[in-house]
Amino acid sequence: MDNKDSRRNFLKNSLLFGLGGGAISLISSCQDTKDPDNKGQLVKVLTTDGKVVEVPASSISAHEHITPAESRKGIPGRNFVMVIDLAKCKNARKCVEACQKAHDLEINEEHMKVQLLRDSEDGPLYWLPKPCFHCNQPPCVTVCPTGATFKRDDNIVLIDNQRCIGCKFCVSSCPYSSRSFNWKHKQVFDRSDVEYSPETSVPRAEGTVMKCDFCPDMVREGKLPHCVTGCPMGVIYYGDKNEDIVTNGEESLQFSKVIRERSGYRYLEYLGTKPNVYYLPPVNRQFPVERGFDIDKEILERYKNIPEVKDFLDNGNS
Amino acid sequence: MDNLSRKNELLGEFYPTMDRFNNKTKVWIGFLVLIILIGLYALYVQISKGHEATGMRNNVVWGVYIVNFIFFVTISYSGAFISGVLHFYETPWKNALSRILEIITVLSLIIGPVFILLCIGRLDRLHYLFVYPRIQSPITWDIIAIMTDLIGCFVYLYITFIPDLALLRDYSQENDKIPNWRKRAYKFFAIGYKDTKEQRNLLDKTKRIMSAMIIALAIVAYTVLAWIFSLTLQPGWNSTIFAPYFIIAGLYSGVGLIIICMYIVRRFYKLERFINERHFIGAGVVLIIFGILFGYFTFSQYFPMWFSSKINDIDLLNKLFSLYFWQFVGANYIGVFVPVLILFFKRLRTINFITFGGVVAVLALWLNRYFIVVPTLETPYIPIQDTRQAYLFYYATWVEWALTFAGFATFCLLFTLILKFVPAIHISDIIDFERKENKAVGSTNLKENNLENA
């Protein structure tokens, strides 16, 4: 027991250090170019490859602003990936809510959606949390006429809403319906306390497209995305393919091993978009699918085309 | 020495129809302006309230605006295509039709892209298309294609206008009743064309080159337009035959619209002697050919989807044949069989029936586009799970309809106004033709002896 815990902690720490270290090295390099004579206080930090380096304390800012131009580069040496364990999802919707809170979204605006699916007639019903898949062959990026949406070296597909002209071609070309449009102006768009960055997707802008951004801003701070930390069941694992490690904050897994041993797959693989979100099939489930029916009736009604949900709704009423 | 009297005779016949603004015309123009004003109010609503004023939502992000865009743009290409073919092969009866064709081409190519602008969320950033262009995007290809085509069509239209503008200039100089602004405008736009043999040869050559180029441009532009859909992964769009399908469908609706315009122009400008049953039957034969081809392509598009039964294709077909049954049947069955049957029976080949066939073809093709765009977006790979009706199904709002009708009204208004400035028939072409044939064309009412003097 002890042994297992310490191993888990080691993995978790190394991952967080790794992610944080990467971010810091990028920030410091940016700072250096801006102000080469900066002789502020130096602090020691651990980089990804285990070296201890000194960087100016001023560069380790938790709220470093990444401009739209800087956000196009990606965090060097990273290869972000997500693994979602469908066996553990009970549709608590905490991932959705955490994401909405962080991105100023309203109740019906979701970057992370939870779908209730059944793949074949006799197949099982299961909950599928669906972020943007950050494909390696992203159809949305190919069709964008202005380069407002772009693919970075670290696997992340982002939107620069200051460049988006709102043609919505990306929305109609995404086979996973990951993108949504800001149909009208809302008060939260006028927030002046935060500066816009494609990495935070806040504040939003009318007439532009938005979607899940894989939270590179959190990674730069050495934290995990909001959906990962929000999930009480530890369904969502986030990590780096280069390090071959993914974590849900509690438990870290070897990416290649878990995909191999638990038959990890990508949604609609045959479309050839090469997503960076992997699913672990809903086998040996921790909860029956009905546990997910225990939500707001209004939200449950989204799934009323599914017989089980219809029965549940009808019985609940009588 | 030249056939001056013949020119004056033709102009004397045509000019009054151009100059006259009778009550009927005034009411017609007033009606069109009213519709356009309602459209402008709808545009104001859309801009002030945001795109929420439309029926478009996150799944169906493209609605009737895109349908209108495809509709007008393909009409334009087909106008250009047919006009180019008529000129290129020097078809004898082109004279009566080519002006109408050319005006349709340019007007619909102006109005079509306006609809795509209505669909864009950030019009204030439109210049980003040129500031940050990405050549990989099919939208960029489309912009290049449409702009090239627009310029090409304008040049072509203008070239075909020159000889008539020169005739009008000469005619207006001698006629005191004609207002001065017209005289000056004709003089300016005729760019000193004197109809000398050299000028005529040069113009003919240019016209031939331009007509061949217009055909090529139209094919490229059609193809790129179809690729906006067929290069995506969406069921129903990701089709290898979309490019030729769009060409055929566009030509079909284009011929339909040409027939309708011929009918209206003939009625209101009293051109029964120039546009006669022969032209309608000629256009009708083209309509039947494209109708059959359109039916064939539609069948080839949907039949393999049904036969191979991929789950997403079947979802789409189920939607088309349940929720949209009558509209889909109207677009793709009635829209093919009615015009084809009308033209199949010799007894039905009358001007009125052929025009009716044209109306059916145009309406069917608008619906056909609607059922290419909307149901696919309503049937994505991952099912839409939403409680809001507007997010499940697309219904165009009054704003979208108002702007749609405003688009059609603008087309009619500009068409009317252009025909107030230049005659509906190429007068110079008629004279050229008569000169070549050495006898009068069309109806026997025309005097033949004028040309003998030439």
Image (cartoon, rainbow, N blue to C red):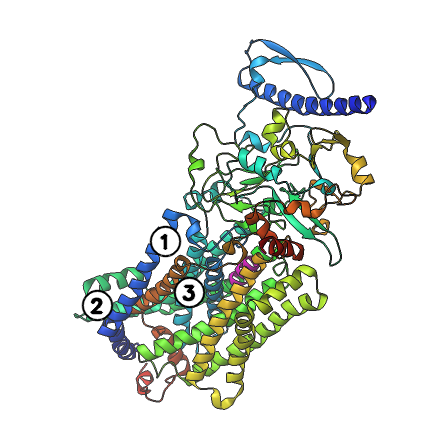
Asked if the stretch drawn in magenta spans residue B223, the answer is yes
Helix, strand or loop under label 3: helix
| B300, above or below A199, in the image | below
Q: Quadrant of residue B198?
A: bottom left
Q: Callout 3: few (<14), some (14-19), or many (20+) C-alpha neighbours within 10 Å?
A: few
Give the distance between the C-alpha atoms of the residues marked 2 and 1, in whole angstroms: 43 Å
Asked if the stretch drawn in magenta spans residue B221, the answer is yes
Helix, strand or loop under label 2: helix
- Give the chain of mark 3: B
| A264, above or below B205, in the image | above
Write the residue at 37% across / 60% down: B402
Tell me which numbered mark, 3 or 1, is placed earlier along the sequence.
Answer: 1
Write the residue at 66% across / 64% down: B314
For the residue pair A179 and B450, the one nearer the viewer reads as A179
Q: Is residue B195 visible?
A: no
Q: Quadrant of residue A6?
A: top right
